[in-house]
Amino acid sequence: MVFAGLALLLQIFLIIEIFTNLNRHSEIISAATHILALFLVLVIYSARKTSSMKTPWIILILLMPVFGTTLFLLIGLNGSSRKMRKRYEEIDRALLPELSQNEEVLQELEKKDPYVANLSKYLLHSGKYPVYKNTDITYYDDAAKGLEAQKEELKKAEKFIFMEYHAIEDRESWHGIQKILEEKVKAGVDVRVFYDDMGSIGFINTDFVKRMEQKGIRCRVFNAFAPGLNIFLNNRDHRKITVIDGKVGFTGGYNLANEYFNLTHPYGHWKDTGIRLTGEAVKSLTVTFLEMWKAIKKDEEDTGKFLPDTDYRSREDAFVQPYADSPMDNEQIGENVYISLAENAVKYVWYITPYLILTDEMIHAFGLAAKRGVDVRIITPGIPDKKMVYNVTRSYYNALVCSGVRIFEYTPGFCHCKMCVSDDRVAVNGTINLDYRSLYHHFENGCLYSACRAVQDTKADFDATLLKCREVTGQYRSGRNAVLRLGQLILRLFAPLM
């Protein structure tokens, strides 16, 4: 923000100087800046990115060369420094081979549901994350239920506990967990906590890590915020993972802060969800945690001890596939999963997201599905946590509803869950919002599941949530105020930054 502000001031200063003291050289200065801007625009245009990511930058740079160029160098490069890419490549080369696909499971899925099998093959090929059986999955329609189940499983830990969250608040919701972790440390359990520094700003004090270490809880911070020029600062750890003994795992939309469990109500009733995995699929969550843990500080420990073979036999014949998404590669796994679900839906595909800032590709996929007769619905918050982002979210409604997509707003408050369910046969739950920041800038994780009760539970929760929503489809089909529409279009220029 500081560097962006300085860049804007520099742009204004340059314009004033051209009109006052540099009239004699204005043509040369203007030509030089526009030539540099044009060169950068050509570089952006040729990049392997979607048009939705490239067009706002091109317009901004051509309109304000100094400001636009500075912002692009800070944010548009996506923090993809060669050093960080190399580090993650080394870690993944060591960790991902620990995950192997049971070919019999994949073949069984192909026979049962070729559509889901194709999506699973994509996740296996592009992310190296296998699809598992011998895993039970439990769906929680309320974050508080997930938290209580999490505490009960933490109490049973015998070997290790891994916890990775975008935000931790040093208040009641965390204190209940911390008490259990302290007891487990005394029992000889290896306890590790990992959080994102930017996500936890305002929630914890700077001595949090020191206090945790004093209690025997190993604690690391992802991408610590520090004043200065850090292009990697834009990439945050948005994942939410708990792993216990490599046998039980939790993920979903909620962080470990009071508002997620409605202990406080800053934005009305907070709607969030989560899932519990028990069995073989937990191995992928463990690897996802270790990837980030090792990225902050190198170590030579044997990771095999955290990936035990299990003889667990599930109650259902579920197919479960946890996966992760990273800005350190050129593969938008989170976005592609959401698009694939829309493209292959037959009867319906429903999404719920706190933020709706879409690429043209997603708008086209959702709209085309609706035109094929698929019931496409998107639920967004009725009370926003970020008003500017909320205005941008609403700016996408018109294009969607004109293609037949139905939009609903959650009237009790803020819906923070990130989910999708389709055709009563497949669902996704995790941390990935339908916005640029989740799809392109953040480290994320999700879980694809099918042929299990959890899919029906997810659909039932959608049904219950829709009853608490107001449909705004007709309202945004036409008739928006011209001034409001113009303001939203200007805000959308900055959509890749939000």
Image (cartoon, helix red, strand yellow):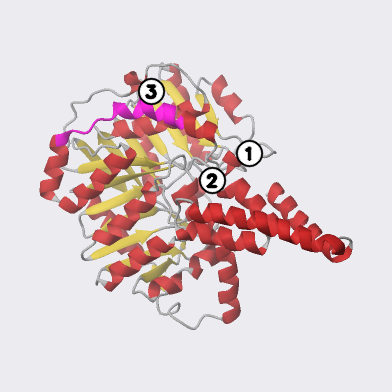
Classify 208 as above or below 301.
below
Report the amino acid beneath label 2: Asn
Compared across the picture, whether 306 is left or right of 399 comes to: left
10 Å crowding of disc 3: few (<14), some (14-19), many (20+): some
Nearest-to-viewer mark from 3 and 2: 2
User: Mark 1 or 3 closer to N-term?
Assistant: 3
Q: Residues within 10 Å of mark 1 (few under 14, many from 20)?
A: some
Q: Is residue 278 above or below residue 473?
A: above
Identify the residue at image location x=45%, y=67%.
411
Q: Earlier in the sequence, mark 3 or mark 2?
A: 2
* Residue 90 falls within the magenta-colored stretch: yes
Alpha-carbon distance for marks 3 and 2? Answer: 34 Å
Q: What's under tag 3, amino acid-wise?
A: Phe
Q: CA distance from mark 2 to mark 1?
A: 11 Å
> Who is closer to the viewer here, 121 or 57?
57
Q: Residues within 10 Å of mark 2 (few under 14, many from 20)?
A: many
- Residue 93, horizontal then vertical, whole percent: 37, 27
For image coordinates 24% across by 30% down, the residue present is: 100
Locate residue 35, reporting x and y percent. 66, 57
Q: Is residue 308 within the magenta segment?
A: no
Nearer to us in this view, 334 or 406 = 334
Q: Which residue range is magenta in the image?
A: 88-103
Mark linked to residue 299:
none
Residue identifier under label 1: 230
Percent across and percent down for residue 440 are: 47, 49
Residue 160, labelled with which disc? 3
Please state if 37 lies on the left or on the right of 100 as rendered. Answer: right
